[in-house]
Amino acid sequence: MKGVRLITNLKFIVDNNVGKLAKWLRIMGYDTLFFNGSDDSRMIATALTEGRVILTRDTQIMRRRVVTDGRLKAILIKGDEPEQQMHQVIATLNLDCQFRPLAICLECNQPLLERTREQVKDLVPPYVFQTQSQYMECPACHRIYWRGTHWQAMTKKLEKFIKD
Ligand SMILES: [Zn+2]
């Protein structure tokens, strides 16, 4: 499968108690799984197998041996607001703020594929087709992404998380 090459191999798994972080990390271009189950052992197993950093508010997870002995990286998220939470993650891991826009599907975490204008002609609103030249498509859900006003608003918000 032809995908976008990942610049960093930092990957995440986000516990459902900090679910909003998944979208923001995907906006930044990080491969991020959202864990929607209640079985912590499964989340930990996935994190270990796939080399993912766990983001959670669950102090129990932080006491697990795999975490305390350093085999598994987990971050205990402290703030209540997604803004504070993102700021903590970015600061703790010193995340590259040169994030890769339009690299990961915000809905299904698939690497997006480049599409030409012609390929998306019938899939995007006419005003978008007229004004945008770069498009990406999710191979799983077939959403088309472009750097429209919605995208710009999200990245502006993200830049604020980084600065604050
Ligand atoms: Zn998708």
Image (cartoon, grey):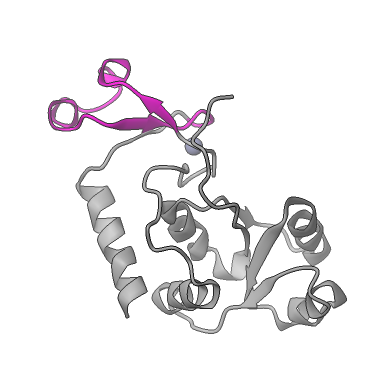
How many tags in the picture?
A: 0
> Which residue is painted at 70% across and 70% down in the image?
73
**Residue 142, horizontal then vertical, whole percent:** 45, 28
Q: Residue at x 51, y 48 (%)?
A: 7
Q: Position of residue 60 (x, y in %)?
A: 77, 80
Q: Quadrant of residue 96?
A: bottom left
Q: Residue at x 26, y 27 (%)?
A: 124
Placement of 27 over or under 74, stated as above or below:
above
Indicate left or right for 78 with 117 as reference.
Answer: right
Residue at screen point 55% across, 84% down: 78
Q: Is residue 124 left or right of 10 when viewed as pictured?
A: left
The residue lying toward the viewer, choosing from 137 and 122, is 137
From the top left corner, tell me how far across and down residue 79 is, in percent: 49, 83
Residue 115 falls inside the magenta stretch: yes
Instruction: Give the side of residue 73 with respect to residue 153, left or right.
Output: right
**Residue 111 versus residue 83: which sits nearer the camera?**
111
Q: Is residue 120 magenta?
A: yes
Where the C terminus falls, by quadrant? bottom left
Which segment is the magenta one? Answer: 113-141
Residue furthest to the front = 7
Question: In which quarter of the view is residue 57 placed?
Answer: bottom right
Q: Quadrant of the N terminus?
A: top right
In-front residue for pair 115/9: 9
